[in-house]
Image: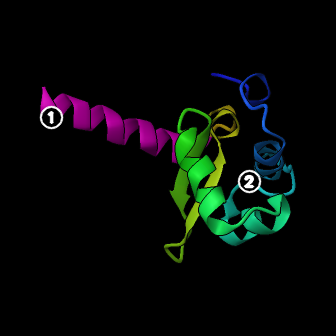
Amino acid sequence: MTDWRSVIRDPREIRLFEALEDTQFEWRTLDALKRESGLPEAEVIKVITRYPELIRQGKSISGESIWTLQERYWKRPGLTQFLDFMSNTSTSITRS
């Protein structure tokens, strides 16, 4: 797993990653990322899609897109990771 601090150098992108790393929140919405990074929506989306190996996308209960750092996601054991693993495992088995 790659630490974002070893990859991200642009100060604007750093602000976005710091918002994702905020320990008060496990997942962040687009509005929260825009507000905390100071970046416009288009720029937030551009950064999010540029680093899929560093940022994980999910869905809230209401269906809203939310994001977290890949590193945080895999370091927190829980049902979500287990279900994700099982989903990917069963998909790869049925495709073989």
Q: Amino acid at mark 1?
A: Thr
Q: In the rendered structure, which disc, 1 or 2, sits on the residue that comes first in sequence?
A: 2
- The stretch drawn in magenta includes residue 81: yes
Q: Residue at x 83, y 49 (%)?
A: 15
Residue numbers of the magenta segment: 78-96
- Quarter of the figure that contains the C terminus: top left
- The stretch drawn in magenta includes residue 91: yes
Coloration mode: rainbow
Does the rendering let one see residue 36?
yes
Q: Is residue 67 above or below residue 83?
A: below
Q: Amino acid at mark 2?
A: Glu
Q: Position of residue 38 (x, y in %)?
A: 82, 63
Helix, strand or loop for disc 2: loop
Q: Position of residue 71 (x, y in %)?
A: 67, 33
Helix, strand or loop for disc 1: helix
Q: Residue at x 79, y 31 (%)?
A: 9
Residue 14 marker: none
The Cα–Cα distance between marks 1 and 2, rounded to whole angstroms, is 32 Å
Q: Is residue 60 above or below residue 8?
A: below
Asked if residue 20 lies left or right of residue 36, the reply is left
* Callouts 1 and 2 close, C-beta under 8 Å: no
Asked if residue 85 lies left or right of residue 9, the reply is left
Give the crowd class for mark 2: few <14, some 14-19, many >=20 residues within 10 Å.
some
Residue 94 marker: 1
Q: Residue at x 54, y 52 (%)?
A: 57
